[in-house]
Image: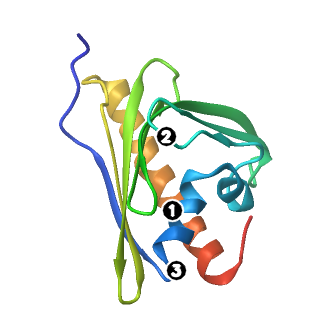
Amino acid sequence: MRKTIDEKVNFTTLVRAEPERVYDALATAEGLDAWFTTGASVDARPEGRIDFRWKDWGHARYTGENGGPVLEARRPNRFVFQWKVDRDSYNTTVEIDFEAVEEGTLVRLIEYGYEDTPSGMKDLLDRATGWGEVLTLMKFYLEHGVSY
């Protein structure tokens, strides 16, 4: 059995939009492709699958894909999936909770399951910076209609 570290990626951000809209931006292919991916597919149900695809995306013109099983999908409250770390050697779990608040939606995201190795710590650091960028891009898209 693979040994994992206790540390997790952990973000909370306020998005000034209703939970259904925020959920759909992260848990549907149409929502993801509107601001983040190019050709995503999402079967948002337990035992379904999420596949992220990018073609010439961002300033670095990134092309690649990643994905894995959907573990939980309860619109508009919770979405959980697994996907590969960037080295493609094991899966981590991403849990996203959406909480309606007066100002909009609190998005709470954690990702865990990183290997207890130096490269596992690098995977965690890469994802921490990546999720920070992703959630900021999503917030700008939903609040201001700005996409990359």
Contact (CB < 8 A) between labels 1 and 2? no
Mark 1 vs 3, N-terminal side: 3
Contact (CB < 8 A) between labels 1 and 3? no
Residue 107 on image: x %, y %: 39, 66
In this rendered view, identify the residue nearer to me: 102 or 59.
102
Residue 114 on image: x %, y %: 31, 30
Tell me what residue is drawn at x 21 percent, y 19 percent.
3
Mark 2 vs 3, N-terminal side: 3
**Label 1: which secondary element:** helix
Q: Is residue 39 left or right of residue 96?
A: right
Mark 1 vs 2, N-terminal side: 1
Tell me what residue is drawn at x 51 percent, y 69 percent.
20
**Label 2: which secondary element:** loop
Residue 103 image-quadrant placement: bottom left
Q: Mark 2 points at which residue?
A: 45
Q: In this view, does 107 lie to the left or right of 36?
A: left
Residue 23 numbered mark, or none? 1
Residue 17 numbered mark, or none? 3
Instruction: Using the image, determine if residue 127 lies above or below residue 24.
Output: above
Instruction: Using the image, determine if residue 13 lies above or below residue 68.
Output: below
Residue 34 image-quadrant placement: bottom right
| Amino acid type shown at disc 2 | Arg
